[in-house]
Image (cartoon, helix red, strand yellow):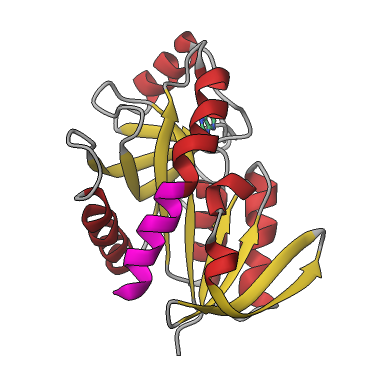
């Protein structure tokens, strides 16, 4: 039986979801509130991870080990790492890379030591379902909003520097977006053999305007997208 874990870093990225849950019960564990209940007929546990790779990893592991989730979806915002990926577009991760991982010369740059992996793959079936839901949701949004699928990078840095994002892009040419939790959740799910997917709405271009764009976007658009896409996803 499926039990879905839904993680977002910030409250704005999960707005309305708790209110949409039936028989919601909230449990506090490890300084986070886990709300279990039924979300559009899907048995769900929703939680805010807070920001960063450790926060994401802690939350994902707890969802699996303490709350028994069988699948995890991470929803939130990200900075663009590609010219074709615009603010307002949606990116579904095919794989995730910890862009600040560097155990060289012991292991190749970006490789997660002792896993042999640089890119941690998301679950294809779950990601395809999520992309389908995003596509249906976006049909009723203004034209020109694109849905992308590809590589998302995560690191413990809010990137607001056009040189830094360009350097990263040179080293990881397939990078579409950057955020701060996805690849940590990916590692936990890989190690625990839990199917997961990551969906991110682009809030900024990871450049000098990123902080301003991010704060504006998170308040206005991110919550509406997360709610709409997850509604489509749970409806099936
Ligand atoms: N999340 C949204 N925008 C971001 C950025 N520019 N860097 C890291 N995480 C982000």
- Is residue 109 at all visible to an observer of this figure? no
Q: Left or right: where does residue 74 sit relative to residue 36?
A: left
Q: Which residues are magenta?
A: 224-236
Name the residue at 66% across, 60% down: 59
Name the residue at 42% across, 44% down: 200
Name the residue at 65% across, 78% down: 67
- Quarter occupied by the C terminus: bottom left
In the image, residue 178 above or below residue 123: above
* Spot occupied by residue 89 in the image (x, y as percentages of width and height): 31, 36
The kind of secondary structure the magenta stretch mainly shows is helix
Quarter of the image where one finds residue 40: bottom left
* Spot occupied by residue 8 in the image (x, y as percentages of width and height): 57, 52
Name the residue at 33% across, 43% down: 91
Q: Left or right: where does residue 227 sit relative to residue 144?
A: right
Quarter of the image where one finds residue 2: bottom left
* Spot occupied by residue 35 in the image (x, y as percentages of width and height): 66, 71
* Spot occupied by residue 148 in the image (x, y as percentages of width and height): 25, 42
- Is residue 197 at all visible to an observer of this figure? yes
Farthest-out residue, bottom: 1
In the image, residue 110 above or below residue 65: above
Is residue 235 located in the magenta-colored stretch of the structure? Answer: yes
Is residue 193 located in the magenta-colored stretch of the structure? Answer: no
Residue sitting nearer the eye, 169 or 128: 128
- Quarter occupied by the N terminus: bottom left
In the image, residue 151 above or below residue 82: below
């Amino acid at each position: 039986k499926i039990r879905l874990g839904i993680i977002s870093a910030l409250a704005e990225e999960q707005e309305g979801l708790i209110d949409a849950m039936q028989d919601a019960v909230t449990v506090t564990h490890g300084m986070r509130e886990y709300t279990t209940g039924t979300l559009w007929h899907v048995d769900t546990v929703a939680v805010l991870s807070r920001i960063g790779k450790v926060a994401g990893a802690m939350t994902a592991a707890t969802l699996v080990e303490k709350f028994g989730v069988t699948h995890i979806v991470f929803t939130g915002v990200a900075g663009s790492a590609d010219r074709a990926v615009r603010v307002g577009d949606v990116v579904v991760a095919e794989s995730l890379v910890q862009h600040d991982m560097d155990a060289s010369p012991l292991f190749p740059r970006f490789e997660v030591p002792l896993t042999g992996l640089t890119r941690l793959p998301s679950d294809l079936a779950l990601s395809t379902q999520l992309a389908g839901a995003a596509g249906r949701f976006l049909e009723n949004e203004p034209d020109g909003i694109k849905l992308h699928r590809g590589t998302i990078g995560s690191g413990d840095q809010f990137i607001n520097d056009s040189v830094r994002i360009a350097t990263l892009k040179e080293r990881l040419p397939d990078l579409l977006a950057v955020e701060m939790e996805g690849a940590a959740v990916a590692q936990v799910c890989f190690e625990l053999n839990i199917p997961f997917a990551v969906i991110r709405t682009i809030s900024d271009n990871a450049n000098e305007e990123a902080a301003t764009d991010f704060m504006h976007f998170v308040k206005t658009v991110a919550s509406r997208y997360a709610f709409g896409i997850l509604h489509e996803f749970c409806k099936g």
